[in-house]
Image (cartoon, rainbow, N blue to C red):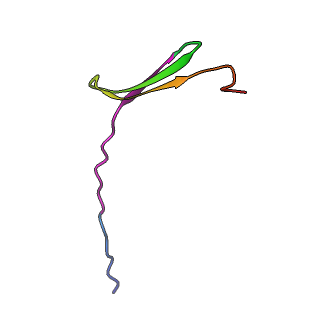
Amino acid sequence: MSTAHFCRFERQVRMRVITIGIDLHKSSHTAVAIEAGGHKIGQRRFIVSAGTFG
């Protein structure tokens, strides 16, 4: 007679909703990340010049 062994594994997954906004201008680009509650997570500004994407 065979015996079956079962292992039950449960994992709770926590997901966050993050919105990323990008503001593009001739001299700079700014990116901001905001969580669902409206709190700013981070911000990054990039200076753009004629040789940046050459």
- Residue 44 spot, x, y in % from top left: 45, 28
Magenta residues: mostly which secondary structure?
loop
Q: Nearer the viewer, residue 19 or 25?
A: 25
- Residue at the image point whose x is 31% and y is 69% from the top: 7
The part of the chain drawn in magenta is 9-23
Q: Nearer the viewer, residue 35 or 47?
A: 47
* 29 sits left or right of 39 in the view: right
- Residue at the image point whose x is 48% and y is 21% from the top: 30
Please identify the quadrant where the C terminus is shown: top right
Magenta stretch holds residue 19 = yes
List the single residue furthest toward the bottom.
Answer: 1
**Residue 36, located in which quarter of the rendered image?**
top left
Q: Nearer the viewer, residue 5 or 17?
A: 17
Q: Nearer the viewer, residue 50 or 3?
A: 50
Q: Is residue 27 above or below residue 44?
A: above
- Residue at the image point whose x is 35% and y is 84% from the top: 2
- Residue 27 spot, x, y in % from top left: 57, 15
Please identify the quadrant where the N terminus is shown: bottom left
